[in-house]
Image (spheres, rainbow, N blue to C red):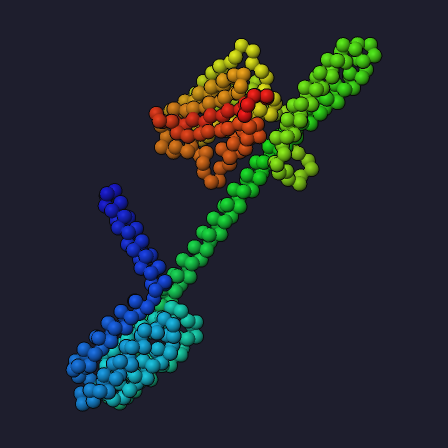
Amino acid sequence: MTTETTGATGLSTHIQRLLTRIRSFDSRRPWPWDTALTLFWTAVALVDASGGWRNTAPDPTVPARLVVTLSLLLTLPLYLRRRSPTAVLAVMACAALVSAASGAFLQACYLQLIPLFHIALTRRPRALLWAAALLVPPLVTGAVRFPRGSWDQHVVPTLWGYALVALLGIAVRSRKDHTAALVDRARRLEIERDQEVRLAAAAERTRIAREMHDIIGHNLAVITGLADGGRYAAVKHPERAAQALDAIGTTSREALAELRRLLGVLRDDEQEAARGPQPTLADLDTLITGVRNAGLPVRLDLQDTPTPQPLTPGAQLTVYRTVQEALTNTLKHAGEGARATVLLTYTPQEVRAEITNTSASTNDSQGLDRPQGQGLTGMRERAALYDGTLESGPLPTGGWLVRLRIPREGSPS
């Protein structure tokens, strides 16, 4: 059953693509199809005019030249059926009226269904009234002039055929309008999605700016306190004043570095920013404990130098958020049986954070590269603020890897 369904779906898709190509070619070059259709029906009508029309004609003595002329008038105008269907129907209706009045009753008169379909497909509903006014006179004329049985046997069935063709044209037109509306809606949704992605990226930059604002505000407050304390200590304890000045210099340099990284980050117009303590690397144990409690086994490995240099608060926050985002996506997308490892490596030149999982999930991206998700984009922007890099991708043995590198202060980027 599955194989049959898959084969049917593949055949349907192939047919749909073929029809799409045919429609595209026809919209770009309509004349080959119009010419082929017109020549085909002209040839059929002329074959009927060679003598077959007498099998159904009430008056077989109609001149052959008139029959040929009427056949051409009922077929050649079909070439213009798409551009001027009403005018084509008018010419064909006149020929059909002569055919009915002369008693030829040519079978080519049924070709009036073609321009009638195009009127229903491309013109306003009011145009169908004019089409009815052109189609009815030949039927009534033939029924009155050459009655065979009751007159409604010749008029009513043909009118029903005209009505069904008009309804078919209306149905096709409704479907095309509906499809066009769906395509337009899909295009608008795609534009809105792109706008939402940009807005989400802007919101992420704003959130980063707020966090940096908190850090810099803290540094300035520390500087202010050290300066006030140093002024009072300068009188009785000059050595403590010198220590305060050293601390002010260190804190000022850190704050200046944060301000330089903050350049180019867009802020929103809100005056009140969310305030609160930001997590540091010391909070990783709490984070990992919460992830373990949520059901994901996580192992934390630390590779440290003998005398590691401390990271700035902003860099610690970047590492923390990266680990948090990677573990969260592992919880959401890795599936059952996943295990995660967090490896933090401190060197004199840089700090590396590698988060891996051993998931067997078939979803390689694990939600990181989805258009609506901004986790990976936000982490890359955070890393870029500190001249760092963020890499992510599937592992050859299965699972996913997120690697963050942040250079230390004063080391080559």
Q: Nearer the viewer, residue 390 or 3?
A: 390
| Residue that appears at 20% across and 81% down | 49
Give the percent coordinates (x, y) of residue 22.
31, 59
Q: How many marks?
A: 0
| Residue that appears at 18% across and 87% down | 60
In the rendered view, would you say 354 is above or below 191?
Answer: above
Give the percent coordinates (x, y) of residue 52.
16, 80
Instruction: Name the image quarter holding the N terminus.
Output: top left
Q: Nearer the viewer, residue 348 or 58?
A: 348
| Residue that appears at 81% across and 13% down | 234
Q: Nearer the viewer, residue 284 or 5?
A: 284
Report if residue 190 is visible in the image: yes
Give the percent coordinates (x, y) of residue 380.
52, 32
Please state if 355 lies on the left or on the right of 58 as rendered. Answer: right
Please state if 406 lies on the left or on the right of 178 as rendered. Answer: right
Instruction: Name the image quarter holding the C terminus.
Output: top right
The quadrant where residue 348 appears:
top right
Report if residue 320 is visible in the image: no
Q: Residue furthest front?
A: 412
In the rendered view, would you say 239 is above or below 290?
Answer: above
The quadrant where residue 258 appears:
top right
Give the percent coordinates (x, y) of residue 409.
59, 21
Q: Residue furthest right?
A: 235
The quadrant where residue 243 appears:
top right
| Residue that appears at 74% across and 17% down | 245
